[in-house]
Image (cartoon, grey):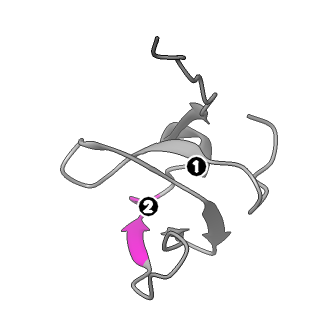
């Protein structure tokens, strides 16, 4: 990932090392996981000293759909 855009969904490693999916913004020393449509809570993932956002953002998520017959 070269840069973050609010339109894409990313896989982000949280402080507890669990993977979260969401739209992400970078702010100084943290990543802001934006709430899904209709939601209001923003989750903050702080970056450790000298940690870059690229170390927490694992990549953009690709949506796949399966047709059930």
Q: Position of residue 53 (x, y in %)?
A: 58, 51
Where residue 37 sits, quadrant-wise, is: bottom right
Q: Is residue 15 above or below residue 11?
A: below
Q: Position of residue 17 (x, y in %)?
A: 24, 42
Q: Is residue 66 above or below residue 51?
A: above
For label 2, the crowd category at 10 Å Cα-Cα, with few meaning under 14, some 14 to 19 and many 20 or more, is some
Instruction: Measure the C-alpha gap from mark 1 to mark 2.
Output: 7 Å
Where residue 67 sits, quadrant-wise, is: top right
Q: Is residue 5 left or right of residue 66?
A: right
Picture residue at 44% right of the left edge, 80% below the top: 42
For label 1, the crowd category at 10 Å Cα-Cα, with few meaning under 14, some 14 to 19 and many 20 or more, is few
Q: Earlier in the sequence, mark 1 or mark 2?
A: 2
Residue furthest top in the image: 69
Q: Position of residue 32 (x, y in %)?
A: 52, 71
Q: Check residue 48 for magenta coloring.
A: yes
Q: Are the residues at dot 1 and dot 2 in contact (C-beta closer than 8 Å)? A: yes
Q: Position of residue 46 (x, y in %)?
A: 40, 67
Q: Nearer the viewer, residue 69 or 21?
A: 69
Circle on res. 52:
1
The span shown in magenta is 43-49
Query: Circle 2 sits on which residue?
Result: 47
User: Considering the numbered disc 1 on the image, is that residue within a helix, a strand or a loop?
Assistant: loop
């Amino acid at each position: 990932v070269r840069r973050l855009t609010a339109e894409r969904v990313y896989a982000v490693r949280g402080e507890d090392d669990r993977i979260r999916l969401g739209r992400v913004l970078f702010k100084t020393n943290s990543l802001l996981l934006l709430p899904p449509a209709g939601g209001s809570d923003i989750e903050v993932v702080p970056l450790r000293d000298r940690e870059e956002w690229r170390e927490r953002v694992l990549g953009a998520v690709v949506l796949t759909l399966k047709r059930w017959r």
